[in-house]
Image: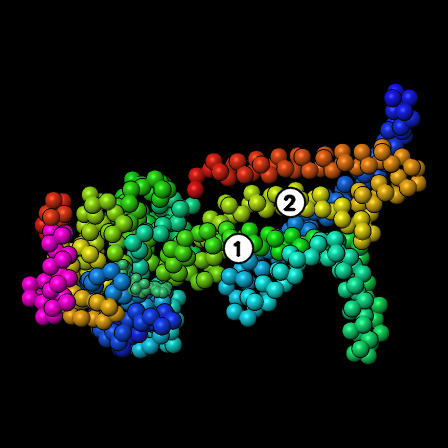
Amino acid sequence: MNTTLAQLHFEQTAQILVPSLVHGAGLVIETTLIGFLLAAIFGILLAVGRLFAWRPLRAILYSFLELIRGTPLLVQLVYIYYVVPLLLNLLASMLGYKTDVQISPISAGIIGLAVNYGCYMSEVIRAGILSIDDGQTEAALCLGFGRFEALFRIIMPQALRSIIPSLGNYLVMMIKDTSLLAYVAVNELLLRTQTFASQTFFTIEAYTYLAIAYLILSIPLSHCVKLVEYKLSTTRR
Amino acid sequence: MFNIFNLQKNYGKTEVLKNITLRIDDGEAVCIIGPSGSGKSTFLRCLNLLEVPTGGRIFYNGSLLDQELDSKRLRREVGMVFQKFNLFPMFTVLKNIMYAPVHINKMKYKDAEELARSLLEKVGLANRADAYPSMLSGGQQQRVAIARALAMQPKMLLFDEPTSALDPELVGEVLQVMKTLRSDGMSMVVVTHEMGFARDVSDRVVFMDKGYIVEEGKPQQIFNSPQQERTQQFLNRIILGREVVQNEYNLSAAPL
Ligand SMILES: Nc1ncnc2c1ncn2[C@@H]1O[C@H](COP(=O)(O)OP(=O)(O)OP(=O)(O)O)[C@@H](O)[C@H]1O
Ligand SMILES: [Mg+2]
């Protein structure tokens, strides 16, 4: 047992892989922050659209939501990275133009995360808005505010109390889901680890460090989310 | 102020308001009474376009609603007080009152605060400016809601059963504030089950049933010699049941 364990190369792996993972972690954090911000904006627009838009538009938005929720994130990422540029080029050539549209791996990754998470988050935001008594909107309208002013000045601040903790959980999920970006050639943690392991065959060591890296990223983040949740539940309504 | 012709409101196939024609003059206090489900709230909410009528015309000071006068401008002149107060729970009492003047009338913060404090004084809550709505009793919340509506300096106030959600012992303080408003000359339309208030404070009483205006007239006329059988039946039922409560809390005895 001791002899087999001694054959592992944790120290060596640490020296080469860990700096690379630290580098990748910066990219992961950046991607998550941008992706989450875009997802939140997209989620709010989708939620508001599904509640208040012109009826046919609501139906279209709902179909889009079903499309995204009915397919895996990984498939969406691959589709955005490989298929969408091909489709655009095809479309352009049908119109008589010759184009070579490409999308960078990181852009495809961020768009994919933002659209996918935006859809799930829109449902949380929608439910939060619906949970606020109609009387609040009516009171605002009767004071002379418009529909959207009532929504953003009066309803949203109250709805956020229930929305924020759920969105926090999506943030923690998203930072882990950035690992899927390896499949669209983003040089994040998983891809760096895969590359290292295939070159050195230090498979056990490499993937153990990878798992630890994700723990280091996600555990503090999920504690922050819990703290915010606690703060929100104890402050006065 | 309001001139209403053949107002109709349907929800799908249910006709809630049927051919309502009514005139409400400047400076008048009109009480609307009637059994539950008769369309009183719907009627009131049509006046400030919270409900969009499905037929007929409403003129406000000569302008056709929804065409010549949009709902936003209308609502700045015609305020509303709700059965459930609907104060903004995340704001203090003071901020509830100041919010619309600051954001809609672009009033200076200091002026708005001064206005809010004077209104709180008027409704007898000067010392609760920094409280949150959840810390107040129902009667206090409703008085804040009245102050909030007054802060937009409306020409008329609509009340939808302003005391129905209150414990009996808190009804008096709200009615008292409404009486003060009335003696200041505020125009109002009040949907109410408080017959004592309707009798003592209003200029005119409108009795609604099943979406129609069955009868309207001066309070003495409606309460002492109603012309329609439906009105009589309703009053017998309501007044007999309520008189006891009112005498007990000495509400209708309060002078105007
Ligand atoms: N949004 C709606 N959809 C369908 N029906 C409605 C709607 N709002 C009200 N109604 C119906 O319209 C009728 C009149 O309602 P309204 O609230 O105006 O009565 P009301 O006289 O104010 O009664 P109450 O004294 O109980 O408040 C009722 O039968 C009610 O069920
Ligand atoms: Mg009602």
Q: Residue at x 79, y 74 (%)?
A: A92
Comparing B58 with B147, the one in front is: B58
Colouring chosen for the image of the structure: rainbow
Direction from residue B196 to residue A75 in the image, left or right:
right
Give the percent coordinates (x, y) of residue A33.
68, 47
The secondary element bearing badge 1 is classed as helix
**Which residue lies most toward the bottom here?**
A96
Residue under label 2, please give it: A171
The magenta region covers B219-243
Q: Chain of mark 2?
A: A
Residue under label 1, please give it: A126
What number is the disc on residue B48?
none
Residue B252 at least partly seen: no
Residue density around tag 1, few if under 14, some if 14–19, many if 20 or more, within 10 Å = many
Comparing A176 with A29, the one in front is: A176
Q: Amino acid at mark 1?
A: Arg
Where is ligand 2, by quadrant?
Answer: bottom left
Q: Chain of mark 1?
A: A
Q: Residue at x 28, y 71 (%)?
A: B17
Give the percent coordinates (x, y) of residue A80.
75, 60
What is the CA distance from the residue labelled 2 to the residue labelled 1?
Answer: 18 Å
B13 falls in the magenta region: no
Residue B255 at least partly seen: yes
| Quarter in which the C terminus of chain A is drawn | top left
Residue density around tag 2, few if under 14, some if 14–19, many if 20 or more, within 10 Å = many
Q: Residue at x 65, y 52 (%)?
A: A117
Q: Residue at x 13, y 49 (%)?
A: B246
Give the percent coordinates (x, y) of residue B104.
41, 59
Q: Amino acid at mark 2?
A: Leu
